Amino acid sequence: MKTYLQEETAMPTATATAPRLTAARPPTTASRPTPEQLESFGRELDAIRARVVADLGVRDTEYIERIIRVQRGLEVAGRGLLFLSFLPPAWIAGTTALSLSKILDNMEIGHNVMHGQYDWTGDPRLSGKSFEWDTACPAEQWRHSHNYMHHTYTNIVGKDRDIGYGILRMSEEEPWRPYYLGNPLYAALLAAFFQYGVALHDLETERIATGEMSIAEKRPMLRDIWRKVRGQTLKDYVLFPLLSGPSLPFVIAGNATANLTRNLWAFTIIFCGHFPEGTHEFTEEEAENETRGEWYHRQLLGSANLTGGKLFHILAGNLSHQIEHHLFPDLPAHRYAEISLEVREICERYEIAYNTGPLHTQFGSVVRKIVRLSLPPQRSLGGLLGDGLRGLARNPLGAVGRKIIGPALSLLPGRGDSKPQTAPTVVRTRPRELPVAA
Amino acid sequence: MPPPAAPPRGLARRVLHSSLLEALAYPHGVDRYVELVRPLLLRREVRAEVTAVRRQTPKSVTLTLRPNENWRGMRAGQYVGVSVQIDGVWHTRPYSPASSQHDPEGTLKLTISTHPEGRVSRHLREHARPGMIVGLTQAQGEFTLPDPRPERVLLISGGSAITPAIAILRTLCDEGFAGEIGFLNYARSPELALYGPELQELAARHEGLRIARGFTRKGRGAPAKSLTGRFSREHLRAVIDESAPAATFVSGPPALIEAVRALWLQDGLPEPAVETFTPLAPRFASDDPASAKSAEGTVSFTASGRATPNSGLPLLEQAEDAGLTPEHGCRMGICNTCATRKTAGAVRNLSTGAISGTGEERIRICVSVPLGDVALDL
């Protein structure tokens, strides 16, 4: 993790003012529906939402209460079995149960409850504002980085930090640097340690690295992360292993495996939600003064679904219905399957692409993108040379390079990105309503 | 459903409260696991099991509740918030138990009158059964007997607001109160009158107790000696000697309270203790003189960066008027859903009258009126 923090010092912040690359960028405007069409498109989606909201009731609470009972049962059973984990079958069964428990806790319960999907129940245990989950990331920070930043500024390069998590190059909009040759490696590391990647997500470490923010400003956040990580570590790697006596090493291995399984699974599902080929990224300009219909349109173009059976959807926290989730983030996720039929039908009528496919093709597409974007875009030799020299000027030669080589670079073809860019100011507010014009 | 036995004491509770168990149950907490098996055996939250259900009249239901060990007890005349889940949604309503605070079994008796609009009361009337678990808040309210007890007590109540009066009466009787007690109660008609047999029994046992019942609707079937019409001086004379002072407790609909207040004012007597019952969870009136007085300063909502001049309304309403949608529930300081971090300023709690410090604390914004500048984490 430390390496990427240092590497990021040199990472330019992509903003709306960054010149747009045309290569490989899916057209977002070519077949764009007219404003009138988007308005009526938005109204049709609003109607779905209104109908589901009016229908919320026992069916939804019974569903989530059942899932919670199953998760708590799996957790108790898994941890119980791991006490006997010197017996291999008990280790396998216990680790499996605990993995499933963590997956359910994080995805179908935690992620969805924290969106406020069950706030209407008035049940303090299902309150989006106070729910805490079984992972390293403090819920409060997740609510900001995910519910607010990611869901509001979905796929806007420079604002939605889910694009590459500040580590990966996941968009053509992100200028290539030699650092990104490690894209596949960083992705593998992020997948393996996903819970910690998520925990550091809201810190905006790259803004600390660029000096925009001081580490002191982030101290309260760091303290909360430390507390959460300490609680999680104490439970998984100290207390349960110690209590299990002779099974100690097996319990540590079982808990680590459960955490790893959940990490890999969550990474896979989440990356399939926005990065398969065909999903769009946007600039801040494109998202300015959006109407409600345009907001829906952007959410739709930026998301991709996964097909699968009922159990698959539950384990994916119904994020396999990423499109419906981004249209209606605060509707109970178990409703997305039935909503998706209508959304698809509406999309067909408006000729809006609806990106969906089985896990292996969608994830394959994500992997290809990670690999492809690790390499520089194919451009003129002069441009490449300029970029390469600029990279040199920024990094290895330090101040001398910047002073001497930097000015000379403006004569070369390519992109002039030597001008310091200010990152967008992020106003920290609680997510409550969709920030769209009515 | 769990067996209707009392929650285990001793070892089970010690284990439950151990910090080791809490660390193992991190981050959800022990209660979130235990409640799935034993809904009453909780570390922190108050819950109660319904142990008996009686339907005294066609429009009421009387529940006997046994709270779990987190219940801190109550004084006669106080109320509790009762939470039930209806169609997937939790609702909390305030009810005044009618049981003596010296109830040997430690149970609470709630008599709940139904209203056509009252979701919770109708739900309980139709669905309450022994074994049902309900959520409970700790007891609240200042409609209670002073210590030491006064020499003479006058209890005036109307409709379902008879319950706090019955609680006070039962408590006094349990304490062997030797003084005079006047008990005047109004109901619409004899068939809607609550606690008839209990009152007769208490009257037989206590010499100083005089009971009169009034029926506001004329009709047949009214027992002899009953009063008709609304509260008046004549009705009062049926239960107490007017010439000597008595500590007075009035519970009932606003009209009854106003009628008593007017008579007391006319006679130059000190304000009686009052408890207003309205059919649905009431919102505090915006013309409350206490809140109008404090309407100065600015209310800042720090997380959203908004600010509004203090209008003297409860902070929840001021936040809503400023375009925010804070989480809330009962809107009368019971359910704690709207608890919000106050970062600066003092507030007056409308349900207790207490004035807070100016430091950081969580307050229930639905019953907190700002006294000058206040900042909330909203």
Image: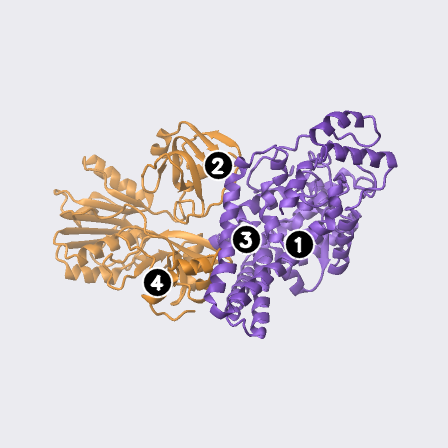
Chain ID of residue with mark 4: B
In this image, B103 relative to A404: left or right? Answer: left
What's under tag 4, amino acid-wise?
Answer: Arg
- Parent chain of label 3: A
Residues packed near mark 3 inside 10 Å, few (<14), some (14 to 19) or many (20 plus): many
Tag 1 and tag 4 share a subunit: no
The chain assigned the colour orange in the figure is B
Q: Which residue is mark 2?
A: B319
Q: Chain of mark 2?
A: B
The label number, if any, that marks residue B14 in the structure image: 4
Q: CA distance from mark 3 to mark 1?
A: 29 Å
Q: Amino acid at mark 3?
A: Tyr
* Residue in the image at 23% along x and 41% along y: B272
Q: Secondary structure at mark 3?
A: loop
Observer-side mark, 3 or 1, equals 1
- Answer whether labels 3 and 1 touch (C-beta < 8 Å): no
Disc 1 secondary structure class: helix
Which residue occupies the foreground of this view, A249 or A267? A249
Query: x%, y% of residue B344?
Result: 41, 33
